[in-house]
Amino acid sequence: MSGLKRTSLRDFHAAHGARLVDFAGWEMPVQYRSILEEHKAVRRAAGLFDVSHMGEVDVRGPEAGKFLNRLVTNDVTKLYPGRVLYSPMCYPSGGVVDDLLVYQRGADDYFLCINAGNIDKDVAWIREQAAGFAVTIDDRSADFGLLAVQGPMAAAIVQSLTGAKLGLIKYYHFGEATVAGIHCLASRTGYTGEDGFELYHAASESVALAEALLEAGAPHGLELAGLGARDSLRLEAGFPLYGHEITADISPLTAGLGWTVKLDKGSDFVGRTALLAEKQNGAPNQVIFFKTGDRRIVRADTPVLGPDGAVVGRVLSGTLSPILNESIGSALVATASAAGEGGWSVDIRGTRLPLHRVRPPFVPLKK
Amino acid sequence: MSSVPTDLRYAKSHEWVRSSGDGISTVGITDYAQNSLGDITYVQLPKVGATFAAGAVFGVVESVKAASDLYAPLAFTVLEVNALLDKTPETVNQAPYGEGWMLKVKPAAAGEEAGLLDAAAYRAAIG
């Protein structure tokens, strides 16, 4: 696949039988053996994901914290060195530029982890917003590899390769750790709903780190897992994916992420005026999650029908839950249609399937 | 490399036909097809007694990735549907030429399989 960007692990993936696809301009493994089996391995034991395509941006300087608190909707003043914060980053319209993780390393020293497909857009946006602040913005995406170890056995597997006391790193915290002899920033975060670590490291060390994790993890049931399983795991957990549940046109409030929008954090931020108005006036649409009781997958952009058959929305994400063994998904529906739990349905090849509303997660999760 | 058994005939649309000699043929999809689709999550098959012209859509196979039509490799009447695929569609991934068969059919005319690809021609077609 010419013209696609590659992580340091591209040949490692190919050697392990990966099916490589174009993901946001990156040649990435969608699966190795089976999306469904990789998904189940993560819920049962552990999975190893290459997410080196994600972007990393350093934000440093005397006004770094102040700047970030203006840039994102969540409250950056809650951070302290070693703490991680999830936040949307919005346009003045309240639509979402991207969702990201903010890491505070030290006073005036932060970095952001952003979506691969948004790196150029985000960095340009962040630089533009930084005008007038005493901060420096550095796109470090090419320097970092990122491996995610996720699942109930993940912490034990990573612990077997490091002397660092990982038990001291709580959920949404991070610390430095030498894992298999490789310097890592170990972040107790993830996108699966399971316990686990995301290990930031020098991109040149990715192969050695991946091989060590795979070898140490195999006896615990760890499997290589691709982006296919990553997507079904995140949907089962009810996590939003940029471009689906949150977009430039779907605000975090519409998406049900009100907990990440701190309207009263005490300082203005990009999108606050629009989001405050949306909160006060109510949004015309809202994101809901559903299951069908049927194995037929309800794919993105399928129209959602109200009780009288009129179109009241559209599907944003849809897959088969390998754990529930039925199709699950999310949809953007007219708020007015959500009053009596909807009575929603979709037409799949001539069969009317009812959508049953679910408040995620779809399955019990550790995190 | 995909398995292409020599005792079957193939359609370019990746269905296979096995003739048993008693006027009953079995229809399924090829190893190449199941591998391209990835994890198969749902198989929609017709009712017993339904008739199809060659090239007509007789069902749908869904994977995590996409839903794809199934095409009748020859004109036939459906005699039996593989009920196993209702609950365990992944059988098509595991044994596309065996337990993962889809239909037993009565061809509309004897000898129609002759118009389909043999294993060598199908192997050439899938590269």
Image: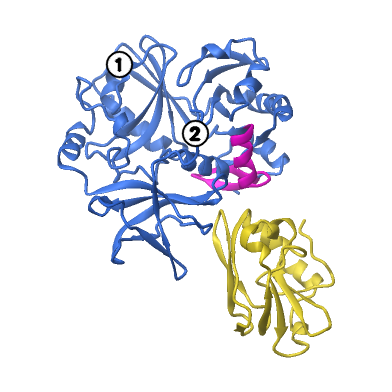
- Please tell me which residue is depicted at 64% across the width and 20% down the height of the picture: A156
Q: Position of residue A352 (x, y in %)?
A: 42, 66
**Image-quadrant location for residue A126:** top left
Q: Where is residue A49 in the image (x, y as percent from the top left)?
A: 59, 34
Amino acid identity at mark 2: Tyr
**Which mark is first along the chain, 1 or 2?**
1
Question: Horizontally, is A287 left or right of A365 in the view?
Answer: left
Amino acid identity at mark 1: Thr
Q: Mark 2 points at which residue?
A: A191
Residues at marks 2 and 1, CA–CA distance in whole angstroms: 24 Å
Which stretch appears magenta? A19-46
Q: In this view, does A38 lie above or below B65?
A: above
Q: What is the display colour for chain A?
A: blue
- Please tell me which residue is depicted at 19% across the width and 37% down the height of the picture: A279
**Image-quadrant location for residue A258:** top left
Q: Count the numbered circles shown.
A: 2
